[in-house]
Each structure stands twice: as C-alpha cells, then as structure tokens.
Amino acid sequence: MRFKIFLEYKGTNYAGWQQQKDAKTVQGTLIKCVHEILKSSKGGGKFTELQGSGRTDRGVHAIEQVAHLECVTMLAPEILKMKLNDLLPSDINILEIEKAKNDFHARYSAVARQYLYVISKRRTALDKNYVWWVKDKLDVNAMMRAAKLLKGMHDFVSFSEKNKEDKSTLVDVRDIEITESSDRIFLRIKASHFLWKMVRRITGVLVETGRGKITENDIKIFLSSRSDEPAFFTAPPSGLFLEKVYY
C-alpha cells in the first residue's frame, strides 16, 4: 500500500532530509519510527520505502514537505498518523496521511515546489533559528526589481553547487515575490524544481543588491554565463523553508 504523507519539521537539529549512515536526518528518523510501528502492530507489516519530494539541507525547515511511504500494513491512514506522531520527536510533525495511487511518487510526480526565505531586519532573541538577520538597511525596491530578472526559464548554474544528480541546470522560475513587514523581509520562489543551494544563493545575491553592491546588470551576467561569485553570498540555511509542493 502507498501512502502520501504531509509533514512539517524544524531542521535545526538535523543533517538535512536525506538519510545518512552516521548522522541524524529527518528521513532516517521517520523510517526508524515506521519500522517500530510495523513491528509492533497487530499482524505485523513490511516496510518497502519512504521518499520525499526533495532534499533539504542541514538546518533547513519545512512548512509542508511531502513524502510517499510504501509498506504492507492493515493500519488506516489516521491511525498511522497518530502512531507516528506519538513516536516522533517534537521537531517533526505529521500533518496528514492519505492513501495514494501506486504510481504516485513524492519527487517525480511533483510539478512545482515553493520555498520561503525569511530575513530579519533586527536582532531577535526568539527566532534566530528561523531567520537570517541582516544588519544593513536594504533597498527592498531594488531587490524586487532584480528578482524579476530571475523569473522564467534560465540557466541557474551560477546559483547552484555542482551535483551529479542534476542532469541540467535549466530551471523554470514561475514566480518570485518579495514582501516586507515592519521587521521582516519575505522572499518566495516557486519553480519547476530547484538546484542544490539555488534558493540560498539567489537570496544572498538579492541581499547584496539591496545593499547596493550588486547591480541588475551583474545578475544578467550571472544568468548568461557561469560565475563563481554568487557562491560567496550564499545565505545561511536558518531562514529557509520548504513551503509547498505542487502535484
């Protein structure tokens, strides 16, 4: 049976989503709990796989990650949700579980993903793990104008770390929006998919634009030819959230 799982997590204490042999990860923690539930449930059960819609790096959070679980069990989705939340640590929470078609794949069935990055304009005692505090005053209007240049199909090789899983560095950015409140700046990016560190490097470059150190012409150059410069401005993971996966 295949289940579709919606979950949220605080990534601060995890080495990312992807299961690793010698590190605590979100996927690894979930798999461990599933094994324990199937082992102790009436009639037993058999675990096959658990895959997420995409990897999040160390320290990155999720407002709504999606995963699929393939297993043999008599447990109903709502009972499985309850049992998982009873076992999971407080920084991982199952939002919903529903039955899925056998061909549903959390990663490959997704048509778009949306990330949120939160910048704080002030020092914060409570939200340090959820924002990037930028001390300099930023020109948000300049950031908005620069962000528009990133919209559409572009080669984002300058904004990504080399990854053998990425067959192409072409990405269709379908929407990019910057808004602000009294003490926060919010950057939302929706795209067909994302390359490794892409959102954090886009954020860093836009912040440098807000500081007046990078121009719109610089961004055009980054999009037209490979440049190592954006890597120097990679934003920290603390302010990054996987916000929504679209199917």
Image (tube, rainbow, N blue to C red):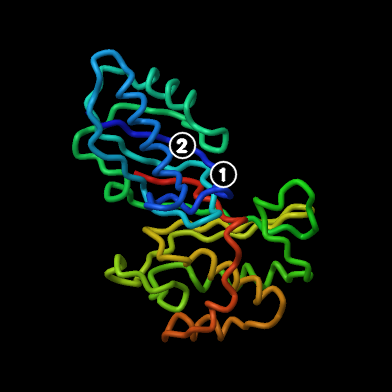
Residue drawn 33% across and 51% down?
Answer: 111
Location of the C terminus by quadrant is top left
Q: Position of residue 192 (x, y in %)?
A: 37, 58
Question: What SS does tag 2 mark?
Answer: strand
The residue lying toward the viewer, choosing from 123 and 148, is: 123
How many labels sit on residues?
2
Residue 97, placed above or below residue 64: above
246 or 8, nearer to the observer: 8
As drawn, the label of residue 185 is none
Residue at the front extreme of this rendering: 22
Return the residue at label 1: 10
The amino acid sitting under disc 2 is Leu
Q: Where is residue 234 in the image (x, y as percent from the top left)?
A: 57, 71
- As helix, strand or loop, the secondary structure at mark 1 comes to loop
Q: Identify the amino acid type marked 1.
A: Lys
Counting from the top left corner in percent of width and height, residue 152 is at: 42, 68
Q: Which of marks 1 and 2 is in front?
A: 1
Circle 1 Cα neighbour tier, 10 Å, few/some/many (<14 / 14–19 / ≥20) = many
Q: In this view, does 24 lie above or below 211?
A: above
Q: Mark 2 points at which residue?
A: 7
Tell whether 101 sits left or right of 213.
Answer: left
